[in-house]
Image (tube, rainbow, N blue to C red):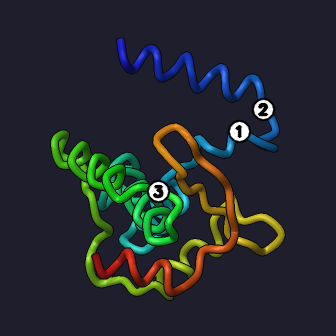
Amino acid sequence: MAVKRSCEIKAAVVAADEREAGVRAHLNFGHTFGHAIERMQGYGHWLHGEAVAAGMVMAARISAHRGDLAPEVVQQLVAFNQSVGLPSAPPAGHTAADFLEAMSSDKKVSAGKIRYILLRDLGTAWITDSVTLEDIAGVIAT
């Protein structure tokens, strides 16, 4: 039932924003970092969902570090990932510069700027291009 409902919600969002000019971009939460993880490790090392799950935690940690998201929400996300066997951290051995390089060639880069989907709360995402190397370094170290 949860998968069916998730598909219905995604279909409604896509139908409302076919060109990804607004709310549809929120469906990419975790994907900017997830795609970088896949690219750096080699496709197929982690499943796409595993990479996106770790990316969601990274984006949530950045949101909390910047003061936009309560740290408790990050802990809820980490606990959920762990309870279902998904990664809650990026793979070791990659620097913030590695992530930036991998993300710079992502299909979601717009006008040369990397778009990140961050959170203000569960269900309240926003789009920014202002994530810094230091932000990324901070979440790799945690």
User: Splitting the image into 4 quarters, where does residue 15 fall?
Assistant: top right
Asked if the residue under mark 2 is in contact with the one under mark 1, i.e. CB atoms within 8 Å, the reply is yes
Q: CA distance from mark 1 to mark 3?
A: 19 Å
- Indicate which label's residue lies in the foreground, 1 or 3: 3
- Residue at the image position 59 percent from the left and 47 percent from the top: 125
**Residue topped by disc 2:** 17
In the rendered structure, the answer to whether residue 118 lies left or right of residue 104 reads left
* Rendering coords of residue 40 (x, y %): 42, 74
Q: Quadrant of the N terminus?
A: top left
Indicate whether 123 appears above or below 125: above
Q: Residues within 10 Å of mark 3 (few under 14, many from 20)?
A: many
Asked if the residue under mark 3 is in contact with the one under mark 2, i.e. CB atoms within 8 Å, the reply is no
Q: Which mark is residue 23?
A: 1
**Residue topped by disc 3:** 69
In the rendered structure, the answer to whether residue 96 lies left or right of residue 91 reads right
Q: Amino acid at mark 2?
A: Asp
Q: Amino acid at mark 3?
A: Leu
Nearer-N-terminus badge (2/3): 2
- Indicate which label's residue lies in the foreground, 1 or 2: 1
In the rendered structure, the answer to whether residue 47 lies left or right of residue 104 reads left
Q: Nearer the viewer, residue 38 or 28?
A: 28
User: Splitting the image into 4 quarters, where does residue 42 fall?
Assistant: bottom left
Nearer-N-terminus badge (1/3): 1
Mark 2 element type: loop
Q: Nearer the viewer, residue 24 or 109?
A: 24
* Rendering coords of residue 131 (x, y %): 60, 74
Nearer-N-terminus badge (1/2): 2
- Residue at the image position 54 percent from the left and 51 percent from the top: 120
Q: Amino acid at mark 1?
A: Val
